[in-house]
Amino acid sequence: MRKKIRVFGLLVLLLVAGVPLAGAWVSSYLHRPLGVTEPKVVVVEQGAGLSRVLYNLQREGLLGDGHNATLRRLGARLYSGFTGMDGRLHVGEYQLEEGDSLLALLEKMDRGEVLQRSVTLVEGWNFRELRARLAAQETLTHTLDGLTDQQIMEKLGHPDRHPEGWFAPETYFYTRGTSDLTLLQRAMARQQQVLDDAWADRADDLPYDEPYEALIMASIVEKETGVPEERGEIAGVFVNRLRKGMRLQTDPTVIYGMGDSYQGNIRRSDLRRPTPYNTYTIFGLPPTPIAMPGKEAILAAVNPQSTEALYFVARGDGSHYFSKTLAQHEKAVREYQLRRRNGYRSSPGAAQ
């Protein structure tokens, strides 16, 4: 206590005897590096002022002790009073790097230079996987926990819309406190824009009549290949089959229709079991997308590659072998299935 009084008295004496000297002395403490040896995040909560920020820094030992801490706090007060920063602190996170001073932190807060977080939504994920990724982001404000998919769509303003496929798989940047609903709104707006632009520039004579059908097709294309160069040809095969009245016979739709009962393998009984998504038993497209298609898959769906192929089979390396006739396809199946691993399947299948 006596030591604090002595420090305060010394500051008063300096301020009276020589303001420029005292100001320079205090300023030197603002410029000195804090005790940060690795990147550290400083959080400014809603309603917090400079006093709370300084208190948290002191508690974590970043201001030093004794007169070091006192002079740093005084310097921060002087800076705040000069700039008016305390009345407009931006809520969020601020990153301190090794060697940063208190002044560097104050300037970041004054500029509102909040830390940008990011979350990546991956092509081919379904809505359940998307929700799990958002729920795992600790710096988001979670407002959707416990809600059904339908309730979420109601909050997004589309109560009659199935959620699958309507969110663009991209990397989204946000700041601490952003809500999960806000990110979904951004992802939905982005996907709608991509779909609208693609549909406006679509090829002629497509076998679907509205953008939503193109979105469904794009989701199937997305799930069928991990090779970007194949998307157009995969889409071309499915378009050919639709035009000829053939079933699509694509395994990813079967898997989606199986839901939680899918355990990594599709049995023959699964291919025969009717579901709205089993394209081995239904004609045409399934009722909704089966995943989040990326922009390239959507573009492939509306501008499929011109091809005579009606079949394809996985080679086992991620790529596919395309065939025009059933005989060619069956030969390719025999060739590549000889080297297949457990759980290998080919799509579309041979049965009509």
Image: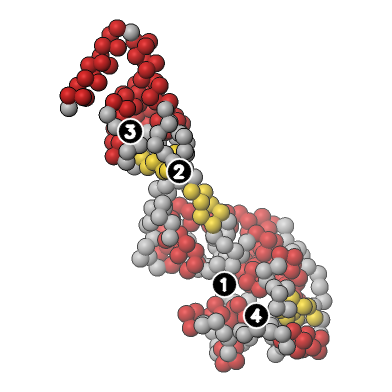
State if disc 4 and disc 3 touch (CB < 8 Å). no
User: Which label was assigned to residue 64?
Assistant: 3
* Tally of numbered tags: 4
Q: Quadrant of residue 324?
A: bottom right
State if disc 2 and disc 4 touch (CB < 8 Å). no
- At x 65% / y 59%, what residue is drawn? 295
- Mark nearer the N terminus (3 vs 4): 3
Whole-percent x and y of residue 339?
72, 85
Q: Is residue 249 left or right of residue 185?
A: right
192 lies above or below 5:
below
- Check disc 1 and report its element: helix, strand or loop: loop
How far apart marks 3 and 4 lie (CA) works out to 65 Å
- Confirm whether residue 289 shows in the render: yes
- At x 38% / y 27%, what residue is drawn? 85
Q: Amino acid at mark 1?
A: Ile
- Mark nearer the N terminus (4 vs 1): 4
User: Which label was assigned to residue 290?
Assistant: 1
User: Which label was assigned to residue 250?
Assistant: 4
Whole-percent x and y of residue 205?
76, 68
Give the residue at the far top of this rendering.
17
- Check disc 3 and report its element: helix, strand or loop: loop
The residue to which callout 2 is attached is 38
116 lies above or below 133:
above
Q: Residues within 10 Å of mark 4 (few under 14, many from 20)?
A: many
State if disc 1 and disc 2 touch (CB < 8 Å). no
Q: Is residue 97 left or right of residue 216?
A: left
